[in-house]
Image (cartoon, helix red, strand yellow):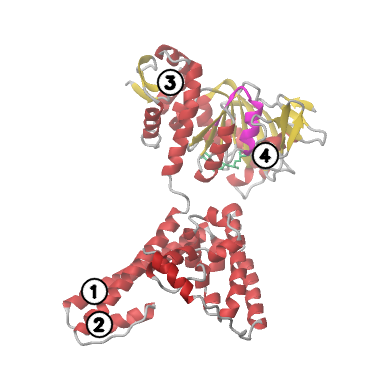
């Protein structure tokens, strides 16, 4: 079992896995693998864009053991739970605006001491300020037209100087008439004032018309 | 300009530059109330206050005399309570559909009540008017009643006419809601019957989680309670039997048709709840094929089996009064 990023392992079958912070518990039907004292959870790239990005060769995974992460668009916690495995001694503030996934997300958060559920609209980050703190990383995966604007607002309030962002862009949800490549570069352009772009990784074949952008907050 | 911030541990006062100017501790339940009071977008902290709070958090907690570790634990507990309270208070996505179905039911009951009053009133004026429950029947009744020179009768006919218009407008609104939220269920069952099933399941997601066998009897339980209360005929079937393909078929074909319709409804509900893809045409055609096949192969009325159970049932209904 090789650790290929901090807290992320490559299994014998060449799949990704993270150390289960809530041993014995599954979040989305993933396979659990016993590994000596600990238990690993397989991390399915077809279900999680971050897993897909890592398998597509993302060089920097800015989330570490003690990272504090603001996760926007946590849905039912599929990816957020793996982020919580990686940031085992940190915190994952998990924001989701929709009621239906939130009931499941609350249960996932209950099993994981570093996860904090927040039912709120990421368009208004000041609303959840009383439950937050400055973070090292913002992970955002919300298929919305104004996703760059949402990320900028949240970074402005919550991201430390030198902190990182991971942005999953669904290029189709911005403007379905244009090519994925051009839409992604538009998104990148919007981020340039506040961030230095480190990487853009296309998520094919795991996700069609999707990319993961990694950037660092730098004046 | 000073700032008041309801934090998970207490109320924090900041001066105009974001400096500490006061703190009053409270318990977790008060924290939940305080934070929820600010959760609505128009009541929330200003961006400026939020920034002062977040950027100065460690220093502010220190000045307020709160241990950071304890604060982090309290904050997590409070966050759970806030999320749960919000979940309880937010209407589900299907609440408009559920409410519209309830309004339609109330409107129909009201119309029925007013119509029976109108019939009695006409009889009092020596005009016996027969009427069924259908919309055409009611229209006929209203027309006949119009010739009776009585303010009572006119008042009633006006109310009935208005209520019928209102019911029609709710129906067309509900059709729109269904087309947007559940095009597959609306396509397979028709928008109104589809809405009744969603309402009976208390939501599309709940309907989508049900197996077809459960969908087939959905709504029968309510009729069952009514039956026990009012001692009417026992219900054999769920809401789905209101579909014309079933209600207009002879009794021996109904079970087979209902099974097929319930199976298609189950698929439709899952599509609407989880994928959103509109495949209602395809589902409707598949149902119609099955429907035609049943019509063709089961033309003969089978010999009827009677189960005598009258006595047993009598004993049961008597014990349960409404
Ligand atoms: C593609 S899903 C996220 C999947 C998730 N990141 C994962 O990999 O497990 C997008 C989520 O963002 C949520 N969302 C959309 N707009 C939002 C907003 N303004 N604020 C917070 N969440 C939002 C949606 O409700 C949905 O659950």
Are the residues flagged by discs 4 and 3 in contact, CB closer than 8 Å?
Answer: no
Q: Quadrant of residue B226?
A: bottom left
Give the alpha-carbon distance from disc 4 to disc 2, as whole Å.
67 Å
Rendered image: mark on residue A146: none
Give whichever of B26, B204 is nearer the camera: B26
Same chain under badges 3 and 2? The reply is yes
Where is the N terminus of chain B found, in terms of image quarters? top left
Residue beneath disc 1:
B156
Give whichever of B305, A86 is nearer the camera: B305
Q: Earlier in the sequence, mark 1 or mark 3?
A: 3
Question: Could you tell me if residue B123 is visible in this image?
Answer: yes
Q: Is residue A119 above or below residue B289?
A: above
Rendered image: mark on residue A48: 4
Q: Earlier in the sequence, mark 2 or mark 1?
A: 2
Q: Quadrant of residue B255?
A: bottom right
Give the alpha-carbon distance from disc 3 to disc 2, as whole Å.
73 Å
Are the residues flagged by discs 2 and 1 in contact, CB closer than 8 Å?
Answer: yes
Q: Is residue A204 above or below residue B213?
A: above
Q: Chain of mark 2?
A: B
């Amino acid at each position: 079992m090789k650790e290929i990023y901090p807290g992320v392992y490559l299994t014998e079958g060449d799949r990704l896995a993270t150390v289960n912070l809530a041993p014995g518990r599954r979040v989305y039907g993933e396979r659990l693998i016993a590994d000596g004292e600990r238990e690993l959870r397989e991390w399915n790239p077809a279900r999680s864009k971050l897993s897909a990005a890592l398998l597509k060769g993302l060089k920097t995974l800015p989330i570490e053991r003690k990272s504090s992460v603001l996760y926007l668009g946590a849905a039912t916690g599929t990816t957020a739970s793996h982020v919580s495995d990686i940031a085992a001694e940190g915190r994952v503030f998990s924001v989701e605006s929709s009621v239906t996934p939130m009931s499941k997300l609350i249960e996932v958060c209950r099993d994981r001491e570093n996860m904090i559920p927040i039912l709120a609209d990421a368009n208004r980050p000041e609303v959840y300020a009383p439950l937050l703190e400055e973070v090292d990383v913002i992970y955002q995966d919300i298929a919305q037209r104004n996703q760059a604007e949402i990320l900028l607002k949240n970074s402005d309030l919550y991201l430390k100087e030198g902190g990182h962002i991971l942005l999953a862009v669904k290029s189709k949800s911005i403007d379905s008439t244009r090519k994925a490549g051009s839409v992604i570069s538009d998104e990148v352009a919007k981020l340039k004032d506040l961030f230095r772009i480190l990487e853009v990784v296309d998520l094919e074949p795991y996700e069609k018309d999707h990319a993961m952008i990694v950037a660092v907050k730098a004046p | 300009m000073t700032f008041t911030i309801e934090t998970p541990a207490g109320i924090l006062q900041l001066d105009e530059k974001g400096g500490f100017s006061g703190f009053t501790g409270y318990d977790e339940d008060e924290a939940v109330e305080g934070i929820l009071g600010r959760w609505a977008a128009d009541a929330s902290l200003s961006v400026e206050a939020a920034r002062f709070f977040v950027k100065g958090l460690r220093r502010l907690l220190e000045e307020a005399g709160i241990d950071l570790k304890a604060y982090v634990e309290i904050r997590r507990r409070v966050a759970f309570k806030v999320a749960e309270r919000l979940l309880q208070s937010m209407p589900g996505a299907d609440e408009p559909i559920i409410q519209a179905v309830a309004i339609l039911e109330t409107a129909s009951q009201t119309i029925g009540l007013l119509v029976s009053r109108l019939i009695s009133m006409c009889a009092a004026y020596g005009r016996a008017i027969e009427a069924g429950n259908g919309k055409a029947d009611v229209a006929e009744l209203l027309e006949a009643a119009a010739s009776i020179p009585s303010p009572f009768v006119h008042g009633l006919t006006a109310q009935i006419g208005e209520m019928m218009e209102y019911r029609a407008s709710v129906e067309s609104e509900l059709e729109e809601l269904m087309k947007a939220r559940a095009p597959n269920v609306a396509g397979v069952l028709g928008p109104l019957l589809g809405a009744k099933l969603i309402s009976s399941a208390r939501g599309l997601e709940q309907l989508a989680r049900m197996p077809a066998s459960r969908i087939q009897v959905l709504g029968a339980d309510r009729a069952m309670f009514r039956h026990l209360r009012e001692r009417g005929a026992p219900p054999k079937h769920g809401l789905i039997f209101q579909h014309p393909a079933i209600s207009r078929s002879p009794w021996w074909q109904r079970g087979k048709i209902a099974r097929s319709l319930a199976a298609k409804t189950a698929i439709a509900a899952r599509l609407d709840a989880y994928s959103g893809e509109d495949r209602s045409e395809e589902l409707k055609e598949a149902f119609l094929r099955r429907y035609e096949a049943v019509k063709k192969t089961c033309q003969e009325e089978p010999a009827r089996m009677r189960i005598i159970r009258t006595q047993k049932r009598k004993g049961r209904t008597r014990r349960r009064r409404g």
